Amino acid sequence: MASFKRYHSTDKPGIMRKDNTLIGYPKKDLRINTYLGEVTYDLMAVVKHYGDHTGGHYVACTLDPVDKNWYNISDTQIKGPLEDDFEIVTKYAYVLFYRKVEAEGE
């Protein structure tokens, strides 16, 4: 799991500003080197936040493990399959969930 720090304080006390800068992240083959060697992860879900520090809406974007398609899941609806990567890798990403890819023979 990875979380982006999207809120920053301003020079005015108690006032926060949301940073919607696009941060690129891989959907497949995120490689992290550890003391045990290289570990590879694939993205399985993204939590997106639309709004600002005073309110907004969260949407989950998840990979269906059966049909391998991506879907947006909101309070009352499911949208998908998503055709474009910009709906998955987005400036609204707040939390990323990755799963470890098991190496051959594990």
Image: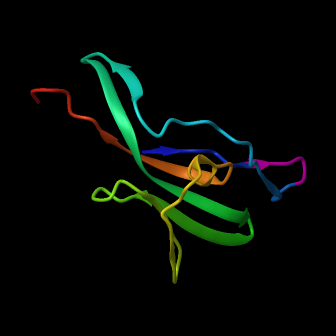
14 or 105, which is in the foreground? 105
| Residue that extends furthest to the right in the rendered view of this protein | 12
- In the rendered structure, the answer to whether residue 85 lies left or right of residue 31 reads right
Q: Residue furthest bottom?
A: 76
Q: How is the image coloured?
A: rainbow
The residue depicted at 27 percent of the width and 35 percent of the height is: 101
Query: Residue 81, image x and y in percent?
Result: 48, 63
Percent x, y of residue 66: 27, 59
Question: x, y (%) of residue 14?
Answer: 81, 59
Which quarter shows the N terminus?
A: top left
Q: Nearer the viewer, residue 101 or 47?
A: 101
Q: Residue 49 vs residue 32: left or right?
A: right
Count how many numbered circles sit on residues in the image: 0
For residue 79, above or below residue 16: below
What's the magenta region?
8-12
- Where's residue 31, x and y in %? 40, 25
Q: Residue 5's image quarter?
A: top right
Magenta stretch holds residue 96: no
Taking the spot 52% from the left edge, 80% from the top edge, the residue there is 75
Q: Residue at x 32, y 59 (%)?
A: 67
| Quadrant position of the C terminus in the picture | top left
Work out whether residue 96 or residue 66 is closer to the camera in this orientation and state it. 66
Q: Nearer the viewer, residue 5 or 14?
A: 5
Image point (30%, 56%), residue name? 65
Q: Main secondary structure of the magenta part?
A: loop
- Left or right: 93 as drawn, with respect to 63: right
